Image (cartoon, helix red, strand yellow):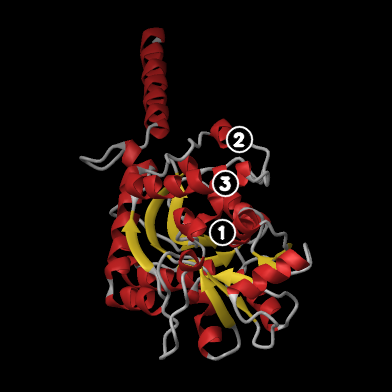
Amino acid sequence: MKKSLAILMFTVFFAVLCTGCKASTPSTPSGESSENNATETAPSYPIRDIRCVVPFGAGGGTDLIAREMAGLVQKNIGKGMVVENVGGASGSVGMQTVFNAPTDGYTIAFASETMMTFNAMKLVDLDYDDFDFVNLFAVIPNVLVTSPDSPYKSFDDVIKAAKANPGKVTVATTGAGTVTDIAFSLMEKIHGVKFNKVAFNGSGEAVTAILGKQVDLYNAGMHALGEYVRSGKMIPLVAFANEPVPAGQGMADIPAVSSLYPEYKGYMPCGPFFGAMVKTGTPKDIEDKLVEEFAKAWKSDEFQKYLKESNFVPLGLSGEEARTYVKNLQSKFCWMLYEMGITDVEPSTYGVAKPQS
């Protein structure tokens, strides 16, 4: 009797133990590992909308090209590309937002050249090594503009006024170390003048300041200024380029600054580049999927037409090829800012080599 009872108790104990083991180890379908169940892979990506962070305000140059590209990618990728403007501190607030997000491919930065001077201007400790380019769309030379009733009718008028009244000519920038700021810094360096710089949260706000005559001058790409130039609401004085820039609609080309002053030539073109990036560490198959989808959109007739009409120089680079391109520009401008005394942070301290002469 005792022996039978012992056998029964052991059988019940063993059955409970086995049941517990099965409950703690979920089964997986045949041929599929538990690791694949836990991690999303490219064939299923994306399964929800993608957050697209623009690190500047609405209506500016970065915002405009971001929305053009996002709309085209959305057509093919099957989920929404939700553009969100996160401006502040020359774009560093938005880029920090993307850096702080998970590396799952659901937060993308639609960024510009501003990150190349984050360390130089002591804004935030982020650099191009912290992100991977999904696609570097294009670059565009900036154009110096003023209002129609401005006393400045030519580039030389600006230089003469700045020399005669140091710190009195008011210019709009999109923040310290941005390419709009760099262009005015170049003018200060080459001509020995000083401007009164006023920083705005993106090109949209700076354009409003010019139209409202709150500032005397601004510089940006024709994708942001073209409609105002062609309608006569802004007067173009010079292009920060080595070749004239077309104004369109039968207007005369905008003269290249280096044709007036050869000292500019080695720094040209001076203008923003735009692209989409994800944080380094994003799963390779998901990043490859994004590269593929953005390349389709970039090659589309709609996007190429947009680039041509806005006077962009097309690039369409990704990965290390894109990183090399931006790092060459970063070297040129960060060392210029340091040698001018605009920053006291030597670029070599944050890994930027001096440009080869």
Check disc 1 and give the amino acid type: Val
Identify the residue at image location x=65%, y=83%: 147
Q: Is residue 108 above or below residue 353?
A: below
* Percent of width and height locating residue 230: 50, 88
Q: Which mark is residue 336?
A: 3
* Percent of width and height locating residue 61: 53, 70
User: Most extreme residue toward the left, as rendered?
Assistant: 31
In primary-sequence order, the first of circles 1 and 3 is: 1
Dividing the picture into quarters, in which one does residue 347 lie?
top right
Secondary structure, mark 3, is helix
Q: Which mark is residue 137?
A: none
Tell me the residue that label 1 is attached to.
179
Left or right of residue 7: residue 265: right
Quadrant location, the C terminus: top left
Secondary structure, mark 1, is helix
* Percent of width and height locating residue 342: 68, 47
